[in-house]
């Protein structure tokens, strides 16, 4: 029975007394020049103590293998099935949640750095089919 564990996300959930709140952010995918490398680096930089992670890309999927002192798991982001990318906050922890179309499980990563999670949202947006809405100014002539 494959039951993904959110070992790395438990830290965010552990401070439930503060509650999980959405963080307003508009993704800026153009500020990330190499989204594959950016995601790998951010995942490795934000791996909690007692865990080892191995992020890799396979076709349209990001697969993160995680081995932690309390368990083993895989985290999967399906880049061709992303519905939206949202940022969350609980206490001094921030999270980047990738919500998939069609009911696939969310991908979630956390950090104490808001900037890291914003850059993660930028990279996911750059790699996904999620389109960033561009607002254009209209003028009357």
Image: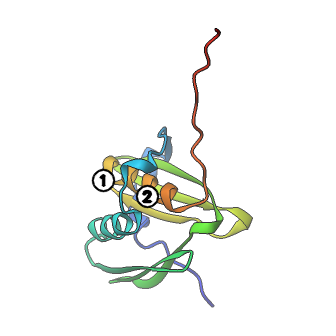
Q: Around disc 1, counting alpha carbons within 10 Å, would you say few (fewer than 14), some (14 to 19), or many (20 or more)?
A: some
- First in sequence: mark 1 or mark 2? 1
How many marks are shown on the rendered structure?
2
Going by the image, does 48 lie left or right of 74? Answer: left
Separation of marks 1 and 2 at Cα, in angstroms: 18 Å
Give the secondary structure at mark 2: helix
- Please say which color scheme the image uses: rainbow
Q: Name the residue under label 1.
A: 112
- Say if 12 sits above or below 68 in the image: above
On-image quarter of the C terminus: top right
Q: Which of 10 and 80 is in front in this view?
A: 80
Image position, residue 135 (x, y; %): 58, 31
On-image quarter of the N terminus: bottom right
Image position, residue 37 (x, y; %): 34, 68
Which residue occupies 43% across, 58% down?
Answer: 123
Which residue occupies 57% across, 75% down?
Answer: 60
Which residue is outermost to the top? Answer: 141
Which residue occupies 35% across, 57% down?
Answer: 33
Q: Residue 123 carries which label?
A: 2
């Amino acid at each position: 029975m494959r039951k993904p564990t959110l070992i790395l996300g438990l830290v965010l959930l552990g401070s439930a007394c503060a509650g999980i709140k959405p963080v307003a952010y508009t993704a800026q995918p153009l500020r990330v020049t190499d989204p594959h490398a950016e995601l790998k680096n951010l995942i490795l930089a934000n791996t909690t103590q007692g865990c080892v992670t191995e992020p890799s890309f396979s076709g349209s999927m990001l697969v993160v293998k995680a081995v932690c002192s309390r368990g083993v798991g895989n985290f999967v982001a399906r880049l061709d099935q992303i519905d939206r990318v949202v940022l969350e906050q609980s206490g001094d922890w921030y999270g980047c949640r990738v919500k998939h179309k069609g009911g696939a499980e969310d991908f979630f990563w956390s950090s104490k750095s808001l900037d890291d999670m914003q850059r993660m949202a930028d990279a996911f947006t750059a790699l996904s089919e999620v389109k960033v809405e561009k607002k254009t100014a209209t003028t009357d002539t």
